[in-house]
Amino acid sequence: MNVTYNWLKEFVDFDETPDELAELLTMLGLEVEAMAKLGAGLDDVVVALVEEKRPHPNADKLSICRVNNGKDVLNVVCGAQNFKQGDTVALAQIGAVLPGDFKIKKSKIRGEDSCGMLCSEKELGLAEESAGIMVLPPSLAPIGTPVFSALGLKDTVFEIGLTPNRSDCLSVIGIARDIAAKLNLKLRYPQCTIVEGPEKVESIIGVTIEDPDLCPRYAARYISGCTIAPSPEWLVKRLNAIDMRSINNVVDITNLIMMESGQPLHAFDCLRLSGQRIVVRTAADGEQFTTLDNQQRVLTPADLVICDAERPVALAGVMGGLNSEIESTTTSILLESAFFKPAAVRKTSKRLGLHTESSHRFERGIDIEGVGRALDRAASLIVELAGGVLAEGCIDIYPGKSDRKAIIFRPEKANELIGIDLDRDVIIDILTRLECRVSPCADGSVAVIPPHYRIDLEREIDLIEEIARLNGYDKILATMPIARVISDRPTRHQETEKRVRDLLVNNGMTEIINFSFTAPDAAGKLLLNDDDPRRIAIKLANPLVDEQSVMRTTLLPGLLETTAKNMNFRSLDLKLFEMRRVYFPGDGEDMPREPLCIVGAITGSRDGDGWSRPNEPVDFFDAKGIVETVLDVLDIGGVSWVVENTDPYYHPGKSCRVFAGREQVGSVGELHPLVQKNFEIEKPVFCFELNFEKLVKLSRTKKTILAPSRFPDSARDIAMLIPEELAAVKILECIRAEKSKEIEHVQIFDVYRGKGVPDGYKSIAVRIRYRSFERTLAEEEIASLHKKIVTNLIDKLKVTVR
Amino acid sequence: MREQLEQLRNGALQAVATASSVEQLQDIRISMLGRKGELTALMKGLGSLSATERPIVGQLVNTVRDEIESALGAAIASAQEKVIAARLQSERIDTSLPGRRPQKGTKHPVSLVIEEICSIFSGLGFAVAEGPEIEHDWYNFEALNFPPEHPARDMQDTFFVENDMLLRTHTSPVQIRTMLKQKPPVRIIAPGTVYRCDSDATHSPMFHQIEGLMVDTKVTFGDLKGILTVFTNQLFGQKTGVRLRPSYFPFTEPSAEVDIACVICGGKGCRVCKNSGWLEILGAGMVDPEVYRHVQYDPENISGFAFGMGIERIAMLKYGISDMRLLFENDVRFLRQF
């Protein structure tokens, strides 16, 4: 809502400067989002009299003027020719700053002093182009007066961001009313005098409301014999100041009064209405109608239309029709002022994508009691500016008129909730200033009837807010609540989430956050099978773009896109993870499922480009190691790795699934080359996925801690040849199967292929550390245990000990 | 025997003085003082001396032995020192080379800010609550006093999914879910992801909010101001000015926009605060009785406040980020700075 300082002043006499007023409005909840000062910085451009004008001695096209600014007579050199001695002009004095940051300084022009500049309209930002300087009317204002004030252009435009509850402030009067209430000043409502002709309005036009639920009030007046013409300058300026375009006198008046009162008005060319009738009804399904903006609209029975005897002539509360628009030849006018049901206007406006100043106001709810007053005000102004005769009487169909109910309000409740201590009288005074009617009740409460234009005041709490607002939020002291103690330990889910995030970050990984919605083909890019549940995503009904149209069922596509994007910026050594929700449709009536997932991707060199270690690329085992660390820290028991049936986006020979007992809790692997290509990634990427929800459930919270053994250890190594297809883990399992308490640790410390190892085999070296908790192990004991293990390996796994 | 001792002493001291390594000095010790050493042999000969001579010569032997011992000790110590000095000299490294660091990862700034805010409120006794992102209209709007077809719904452009469900437009439905689950006192903070169908330089279709809710007996609007003042002071530094001004949210009344003194210019006015000296960082208010009605709380017996803020906005202010889109581009050159 745009409003100007001068316009507000017409209704209320405040002393505040524009800056002070902006602050006051903001603190009233009418937030001033922007402020434009017309003529700002131009106070030094004043009305001045050219007392003498003579040619410049050293320049043909220049003249030297003696200019009187009310205090001094100054020497000014000027290049314009369109003025003469005795003219009143606009003088920019030394120190003035013209639009475009043009500073006026004392200068010498071809040897003659020049103490200022005579300005053109263009130089003052008043016109796009101008020929010569601005010559002012002789009696405009006393010389020395700032030109902008003299022209009545000095004003400030406030752009107010209104909250949807304050429909009463969608008008200049509404805002002035709040200022008056805050400052305890009197509001001057505009006066209008109605002079009516002999012709009776009922004899000219009849109005029928077929749907009084959607149109509870419809009022109209008729004016004949008027002349459509351009609006007078004051009206044009006023509308321009708030960014409205001037159309013609009649249309401009309807807009002016709408801005002034908040009541949208519409003027029909009465001669173009058929059958001397107005019918307010809902549209027929598929009924067509061309609105003022020359757009053909197809209507539905949910749309309310204003019709003449034959056809729609306006879309109620939204926009008029081309078929009855005011034209330069129009002479008779039907002026409409009505109340349409907010929800209905909103529906139509939304469906058609047609948001107008009028629909904006009707949607939020206008003052049903103000319908007649705005109509009279506009009608009298039309007669004043466009001539013509106003028919006698006013059509006003308002069947459901009812009085507002009183709200029971307890002043002490207001104090208690806000945390202030205002006297009852002060509270009642605030309500009275808001034009509420207040009457005391026997129990100490008061009955409050809010003014009809404040449709937002319905409950006690609404009045309590008004007390806080008018008294000032700044007057409320900041206090600390007195509260009861509540146990607020984070849930296990929350604690684990933080723990895993910390862990990944402390292991060199960078957290990313991608949008929760993705492209529908994301699953396809991962080569997921047709029956993969991750192919069934929740779709958005109204996505912004196709790439963000389904809720993601896997975090991988986002991770891989991020990987590719970073690689394009030459960030080649990446360790990324994302820990966010994925979304699956619920079964039937169930809520969708939103499990938290973790994915990670690593690529590039292991240590970055360092000087101290060989620059090796990361591989599968770096990714697996991260997964192992997470499982270890969360103390997940019964971990096993399965190489079969890994997801299709992994390299089948370099991936595995990880289980805790029988539950799959994640997977790790090198990205399949085709998937790598689908995501336009140039280098191998190793990924892992973890099902966070399962991890939380399986994470053991109790740990048994053993005191370390005090006895010496003894280590034995075994080097063996095993076929390539035998998994190394089988060797570890075979050794552990011995279940000896004396085996403290088993570690694979070398894997070798090459010289001395036949094709199809690998050499594996294992170190077993023996130690007892009870005694120092004898050499023979260890030898016998170790021999048993070696025999087992040879017998069960057919290894060849080297 | 005296001359013999004298000779031995001189010879030993001479040898110690000319020895050049710890090993040579050890050899001297053995050849003199060892089990088969010269001095030891001499001492064995003491028995053949007369009872009067024995103590005198014995003492002399001891003196000579002490002398040799101490010379050897000093020489060995000095030889060892030289060895160490030589080793230290030879082992010098270029310490200006960069250290071998464990790799450092970083949390996303959104996570960092959420953690920080939760930690501040946890210190004030607020528990962390969560809720679904795909919500029913009832929790996201109706129970929060946004009736259907109400213009207030325009304040939040909504993404819809099937079955009358939507992507929550704010974290406020967590208020409803929490109050339906428990009776007062309630003190929660609810961080989460929210969605609005709006995308430009200052709006992202997905962003994050933190919701706060406190309901107890006799909680006042002044208390809201107090809690938010403490919070902003902790988040942005002591004595950050806080300003509440009237606003409107369907689920709170009275409602307020909360501004803090601009953290960039300190309130003098700059580009970031559009010369107002204030930055809008959160919305707040006293919980509307209509909301209590939906969760079966009795507004005559309890009162409370709620507030909500945008995480991205706070992250941008805290880290001086000018474009919100940077937060979701996931460029590691950006993320690794946190």
Image: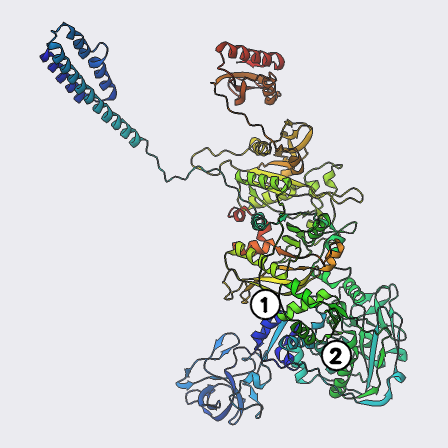
Q: Quadrant of residue A698?
A: top right
Q: Residue furthest front?
A: A442
> Which amino acid, mark 2?
Thr
B146 versus B130 height, above or below: below
Q: x%, y% of residue B198?
A: 67, 57
CA gap between label 1 and label 2 equals 41 Å
* Residue neighbourhood size for the residue with mark 1, other residues' Cα within 10 Å, grouped as few (<14), some (14–19), many (≥20): few
A74 is higher (above) or lower (below) than B109: below
Task: State the residue position of label 2.
Answer: A254
* Residue A69 placement, left or right of A200: left
- The x and y percentages for residue B194 are 67, 52
Nearest to the eye among marks 1 and 2: give it.
1
* Residue nearest the observer in this picture, A57 or A312: A312
Up-down: is A583 above or below A189?
above
Horizontal side, residue A506 vs residue A27: left or right: left
* Disc ID at residue A475: 1
Q: Is residue A562 visible?
A: yes
Q: Is residue A314 left or right of residue B187?
A: right
Q: Position of residue B249 (x, y in %)?
A: 68, 61
Left or right placement of residue B64 versus residue A433 in this view: left
Q: Secondary structure beneath disc 1?
A: helix
